[in-house]
Amino acid sequence: MKTLKSYEKYFENKIVTDIDLSNKGLTELPKLPKSLKKLICYNNKIIELPELPKNLEYLDCYNNNLTELPELPESLEYLECDENSLSKLSELPELPESLKDLYCSNNYLSELPELSKNLKELYCDFNQLIKLPELSKKLNTLNCANNNLTELPELPDSLGILRCNNNNLTNLPELPEKLEELDCSNNDLSELPELPESLKYLSCDGNNLPYNDLNSYWKWYYEQHPDEKAAKDFNI
């Protein structure tokens, strides 16, 4: 098994852009080369990350023992830090504007910093969140299941997948016209907003609703609005 010094010696005076140190039983990382753009170090026992190179674009530190992250470089586009012991993502009030994919599930987060306007994927399920910040208008997927949310922010038109099950939601905001998947099961909902015709999957059991999936919703909807084109097009 290589030592930290042997890794550092190997990186010395080399232009290294990608490093994979996953599944090596490490408790810490060596000093990282300045040329590094991609760092993979998941499935270790790392307690603290070293200073991150300024040009880093990709960081996967999934399943470690991290309680905090170092300052995130402005170049970062991908961050996966699921299954750690993080109570916050950043000491700064906002995440890097370059960030497109954020996976921070299974931590102890009670809030998120201001999100990048370029964010497309957000997985923050299994935390202790009580509210979400404003969402990117480019967001495709939002998974905020298994938190303590009582409301959701305005949903962007770009959103295709929404998983907000197992929260304390009493209502949902207007749903995007392009939404294809909605899981809002196990909340305190007594009604849903109008569902878009693009929706292909619905799970809403565990609420105070007269339906629990897409088929039963459209049957109910047809009974309430027999002349509505949306119900007729569903061929019930």
Image (tube, rainbow, N blue to C red):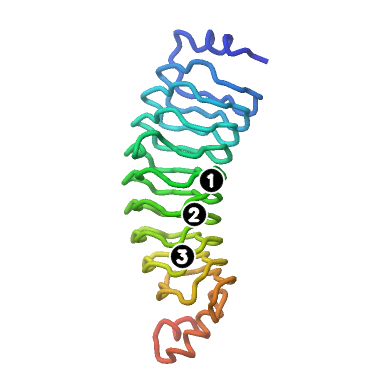
**Which one is closest to the eye, mark 3 or mark 2?**
2
Residue 60 - label? none
Q: Which mark is residue 180?
A: 3
- Pick the residue in front: 7 or 198: 7
Disc 1 marks a residue whose amino acid type is Ser
Q: Is residue 47 above or below residue 104?
A: above
Residues under numbered marks 1 and 2 in contact, where contact means CB atoms less than 8 Å apart:
yes
Report whether 24 appears left or right of 143. right
Residue 212: x percent and y percent?
57, 75
Q: Position of residue 122 (x, y in %)?
A: 45, 49
Q: Position of residue 143 (x, y in %)?
A: 49, 54
Q: Is residue 82 above or below residue 149?
A: above
Is tag 3's residue or tag 2's residue first in the polypeptide sequence?
2
Mark 1 sits on what residue?
Answer: 105
Report crowding for label 3: few under 14, some 14 to 19, many 20 or more residues within 10 A (C-alpha).
some
Q: Give the structural element (helix, strand or loop) at label 2.
A: strand
Tell me the tag on residue 143: 2
Q: Quadrant of residue 75?
A: top left
Task: Kindly identify the amino acid type of the residue bearing the numbered disc 2.
Answer: Asn
143 or 93, which is in the foreground?
Answer: 93
* CA separation in Å, label 1 and label 2: 9 Å
Task: For mark 3, give the secondary structure.
Answer: loop
Which image quadrant is residue 146 in? bottom right
| Badge 1 element | loop
Q: Residue at x 59, y 32 (%)?
A: 64
Q: CA distance from mark 1 to mark 3?
A: 22 Å
Q: Residues within 10 Å of mark 1 (few under 14, many from 20)?
A: many
